[in-house]
Image (cartoon, rainbow, N blue to C red):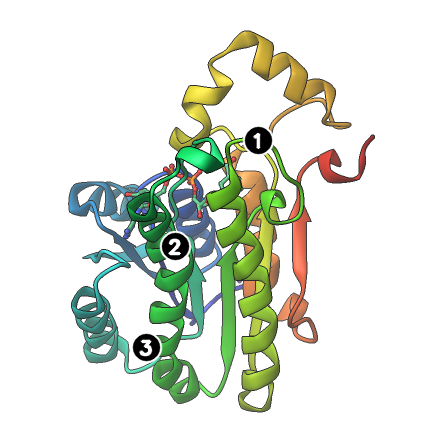
């Protein structure tokens, strides 16, 4: 029997990379997964891959910057299931820019997706999580919320804020048996990092900084998400779970 048998999960940004791997892992463990993405075709591809693996999934199109999309997305979950046990706020974008050249509109865009998207989805999911008599919210942060490199100030700011937000939500929802934790991956090979990691010098330098000597595969992070989603982490809330091959603790 799977570790998420009978559970209803919703993953945002599930059309690619980490969101797709997390959705597949949850489905393998018996969850029914609503796979949501602003890119409908990619959400459907994830749902089809899960179905081909004999899992249960339903694609949903929603942009996390749109309150209307989010309301419609949770309405669909309510109509189909009436409750929700697991929410993974995974949708995210990145931008590289010198701090002094980064315009207000760029700040707004990244804050809107990476932080306000988490706020909107979590707020809207509450009623369904309470209908399930408790559950787990997993917010995708990054080691870049605690470690800093040049030209990534907006991204790092949003990821630090996500950890702070998760702790506040954890305290506020604990009495409803809703746990809220952050996941903080290091470098994972996905579309998000593809451009940077294509540069051999960058790859080499980053691997030298990673004690385990390799980047994460999306499934490595999905396994950590599974832990936070399952009852194995039943007494863990308000934590930041780092999944970085030791990168953030190495000199
Ligand atoms: N790849 C890494 O190394 C890494 C490391 C740490 C944290 N993260 C975080 O993990 C999450 C997933 O990243 P990934 O590497 O899988 O990236 P990705 O680009 O492969 O996937 C991101 C997905 O989010 C979707 N998305 C983007 N904006 C959206 C919006 N407004 N509404 C709905 N969906 C939207 C995209 O369509 C895409 O399918 C992000 O929050 C990212 O910051 C990634």
Horizontal side of residue 236 vs 220, given as left or right? right
**Which of the two discs, 1 and 3, labels the residue nearer the N terminus?**
3
Residue 72: name its quadrant. Answer: bottom left
**Which of the two discs, 3 and 2, labels the residue nearer the N terminus?**
2
Distance of label 3 from label 2 (alpha carbons): 18 Å
Q: How busy is the neighbourhood of tag 2: few (under 14 within 10 Å), some, or many (20 plus)?
A: many
Please name the residue that numbered disc 2 is placed on: 111
Residue drawn where x is 71% and y is 22% of the image: 213
**Which of the two discs, 2 and 1, labels the residue nearer the N terminus?**
2
Which label lies toward us, 1 or 3? 1
Q: How busy is the neighbourhood of tag 3: few (under 14 within 10 Å), some, or many (20 plus)?
A: some
Q: How busy is the neighbourhood of tag 1: few (under 14 within 10 Å), some, or many (20 plus)?
A: few
Please name the residue that numbered disc 3 is placed on: 124
Quadrant location of the C terminus? Answer: top right
Please name the residue that numbered disc 1 is placed on: 150
Q: Is residue 4 visible?
A: yes
């Amino acid at each position: 029997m799977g570790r998420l048998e009978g559970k209803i999960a919703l993953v945002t940004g599930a059309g690619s990379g980490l969101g797709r791997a997390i959705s597949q892992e949850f489905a393998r463990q018996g969850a029914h997964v609503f796979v949501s993405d602003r890119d409908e075709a990619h959400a459907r591809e994830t749902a089809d891959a899960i179905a081909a693996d004999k899992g249960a999934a339903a694609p949903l199109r929603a942009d996390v910057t749109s309150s209307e999309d989010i309301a419609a997305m949770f309405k669909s979950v309510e109509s189909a299931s009436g409750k929700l046990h697991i929410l993974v706020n995974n949708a995210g974008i990145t931008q590289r820019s010198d701090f002094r050249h980064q315009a207000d509109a760029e700040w707004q865009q990244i804050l809107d997706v990476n932080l306000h998207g988490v706020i909107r989805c979590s707020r809207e999911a509450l009623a369904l999580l309470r209908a399930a008599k408790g559950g787990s919210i997993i917010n995708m942060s990054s080691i870049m919320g605690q470690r800093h490199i040049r030209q990534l100030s907006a991204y790092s700011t949003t990821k630090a804020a996500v950890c702070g937000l998760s702790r506040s939500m954890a305290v506020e929802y604990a009495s409803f048996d809703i746990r809220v934790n952050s996941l903080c991956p290091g470098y994972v090979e996905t579309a998000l990092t593809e451009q940077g990691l294509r540069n051999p010098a960058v790859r080499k330098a980053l691997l030298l900084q990673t004690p385990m000597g390799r980047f994460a595969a999306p499934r490595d992070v999905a396994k950590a998400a599974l832990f936070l989603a399952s009852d194995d982490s039943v007494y863990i809330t308000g934590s930041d779970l780092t999944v970085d091959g030791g990168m953030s603790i190495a000199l």
